[in-house]
Image (cartoon, rainbow, N blue to C red):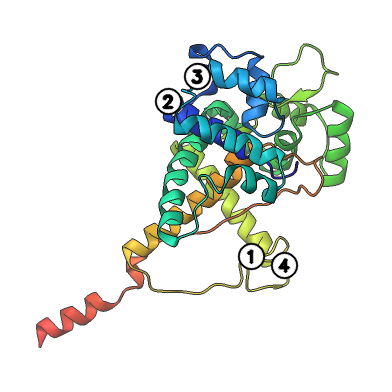
Amino acid sequence: MENKRAFGAFLMQLRIDAGHLKISTFLEDVNIPFSANYYRDVEAGRKYLSIDAAVELHDHLGIDVDSKASFDYYWHYFRDLLPGDVHEMLFGKGVEVTDLSSRIELREHDSKILRRALSLSRYEREFIITEEVIKAFEENFELLPLMTYLYMVDSAGVAEMQLVCQQLGLAYDQRTEAFLNLVSKERDAPQEPFVRHAPTLRMPRSVDALKLKDMFLRHEVERSLLKPEKSEYFDVSGSFKYSSMVTLKDAEIEQIQDRLVDLFSLIEVHNKSGTQLEDSGAQPYFFGLIVSGRPEYDGRAARTAKEDKE
């Protein structure tokens, strides 16, 4: 059932169109025939309903059996369960489109849904750090990889963290433990595992937090520049050495930014930001791309001033 998420995507769209960005508020208005956690798994594409359960959910959602929404509901449900040719033979292409204009229209519609879902997903799954944590990051900058590790694996025991410290050439001492306690849930005993607050740790847009992000960016750039050049394209083990300067109009810059947001929305919403280090093929990957207009590089103002003098 890999990549079979049509039904979950339809349920998410139905929920958002009903005005519910949060699953929790949506379920307050709907009496679903199974647990809230199971519904979350169905919408995320992690679990699949039996036919009887799908029919029961359809009725509980209050979908009119004679409406297009009802057809779309079962079209998406069976799209996950049947081979493509069998599904098309029974249901036709349904909501699928082939002409370019319709594809663009559908993409723009899906983009808005995915962006709203991404915003909500981040809101529900974030731990916004305090000034105390920011100060700890500044004073213990070399311990940042420990936080990264914890937030990618969900939880880690003391022995596991000691091993990670050993691999990174760090000492596991009271300072290390105090740092980890700041970025994890409260523990009742010293030997209890460290558990992250939420899937995402996010910094507020305060002055100190932005300084810390700049410090991290400089650190990553310096490390990357020490690596041998490998590719002109993005490479996991490459560097920032390859670059090019292009001229873009404002509308083109906005288009690049919009497409990037669409791409990351698609990845994060469909994956539910659930990938962790222990998952097969998962690896930490820091991605940085700056799309910025730099007026100081534009010398045309000097030419204008020269012409005025003449």
CA separation, marks 3 and 4? 49 Å
- Which residue matches tag 1? 234
Identity of the amino acid at label 3?
Answer: Phe
> In the depicted view, which residue is nearer to us: 105 or 132?
105
Secondary structure of the residue carrying numbered label 3: helix
Identity of the amino acid at label 4?
Answer: Lys
CB atoms of marks 2 and 3 within 8 Å: yes
- Which residue matches tag 3? 26
- Which residue matches tag 2? 18
Q: Earlier in the sequence, mark 2 or mark 3?
A: 2
Left or right of residue 56: residue 289? left
Task: Determine the residue positioned at 45% across, 60% down.
Answer: 99
CA separation, marks 4 and 2? 50 Å
Q: Where does residue 19 sit, x and y in percent of width and height? A: 41, 25
Q: Where does residue 305 sit, x and y in percent of width and height? A: 16, 79
Which label was assigned to residue 227?
4
CB atoms of marks 2 and 1 within 8 Å: no
Secondary structure of the residue carrying numbered label 4: loop
Secondary structure of the residue carrying numbered label 2: loop
Identity of the amino acid at label 1?
Answer: Phe
In the rendered image, the vertical position of residue 98 relative to residue 243, given as above or below: above
In the rendered image, the vertical position of residue 171 relative to residue 60, given as above or below: below
